[in-house]
Image: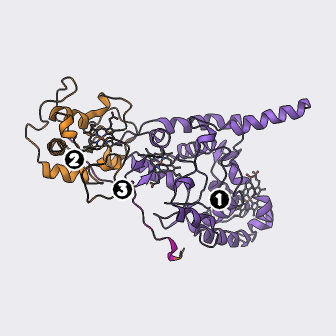
Chain colours: A orange, B purple
Amino acid sequence: MAVHGACRALLAAWVLLPALGEAQQPLHPFTVMGDAIPDSLTGQRGDPVRGRAIVASRQRGLCLLCHAGPFPEERFQGNLAPDLSGAGGRWSAGELRLRLVDSQRLNPATIMPSYYRTEELARVGAPWRGRPLLAAEEIEDVVAFLGTLKD
Amino acid sequence: MTRRRRAMLVAMLVLSLGGAEAVGPGERRSGFDDMAPETRAMQLDDMANPGMLWVAEGEAAWRRPAGPAGRSCAGCHGEAEASMRGIATRHPGWDQAAARPISLEDRINLCRRERQGGEPFAPESDDLLALSAYVAHQSRGMPIALPDDPRLTPFREQGRHIFEQRRGQLNLSCAQCHEEHAGRRLAGSVIPQGHPTGYPIYRLEWQSLGSLRRRLRNCTVGVRSEPLDEQEAVALELFLMFRANGMPMESPAIRP
């Protein structure tokens, strides 16, 4: 049905086209010590430049749905969670890793998704089933990037 | 006060409080209240509200003969201003034959098929949206008034369970956004309390009219969850309407 041009304001949607997760494969094993995962999931250091792109991407990282951060190019940032600025000053790499992998271990009620977990989830849609939100390499990239946010 | 009048008053109170959930009635806000002033003005002005185009289309469909007997909706129901007044405030409503609540769209399609003998309208088709907008529009300004009918209770409780259950790859429940974080911003969008007061709505993002079912699909896909089946979807809609009991209908509303 045709509609007058009066309301062509296309607003930012949070519902995005399905971004396919990684190919279904077993998660890398990891060890939680205290409130941290001290060792890299891949045994390698991540790439902070790739990490920044993941965090800023509304299809991939989704972080800015909830968080704000030092991303002047991103107009729409959330206010449901702490600003990511300074995260690398507040937390060690290991602490950041656990917060990404499975924040719900630290705070079961948090809305922060567990980015590297495929178990104990209900009614996951078929395209995403059995896949973590981010691959191990991507987790490491994001950890490396967050580590650069010292203030 | 006579005993009967008191009983009636109590019954009315129970009715109006029946839907009050975690968010108390005083604090309930329609998504309308979170919109920019220009968008609110557009909704309130029938000449500017694009949803009114569907309402006009619906009125024409209401009078159009259809099916082998050539009967129109108006042929049986007369003027919609009288016969359809308040109907949308009580839907999803109990359907005796199906033995479960059905949505307003399904109710219209039931008449289409069984009373007119016509082909049922496809979900989200312009014809069905137009007729449901026209019927729902007859309740504009009236409070949502789902009855305290015990037959509805199990479905409403199923809906509540869906509303509160964390689901999808993002592992989020409807309640986490629409109760715990309502009023905060998810990227650019203010999270509304999620009251279905204005359906079908004209959504600027869709550039079209759409049903509550379509809106709920957006939120389910948003958390990367599998689609709800028919019974789950109608139970969730029923719960949302109970939760909004007493709030005025706005159909056709505009939403970002």
Q: Chain of mark 3?
A: A
What label does residue B109 carry, if any?
A: 1
N-terminal-most mark, 2 or 3: 3
Which residue is denoted by mark 2 in the rendering?
Answer: A23
Q: How far apart are the alpha carbons under marks 2 and 3?
A: 19 Å
Confirm whether residue B209 shows in the render.
no
Q: Secondary structure at mark 1?
A: helix
Q: Chain of mark 2?
A: A
Element assignment for label 3: loop
Q: Residue furthest left?
A: A44
Which residue is disc 3 drawn over? A16
Amino acid under label 1? Asn
* Residue at the image point whose x is 21% and y is 23% from the top: A34
Same subunit: marks 1 and 3: no
The verdict on a common chain for dots 2 and 3 is yes
Q: Position of residue A106 (x, y in %)?
A: 30, 28
Question: Is residue B172 among what the camera can see?
Answer: yes
Residue B51 lies in the magenta-colored region? no
Q: Quadrant of the N terminus of chain B?
A: top right
Image point (26%, 44%), residue name:
A84
- Distance from label 1 to label 3 (Cα)? 31 Å
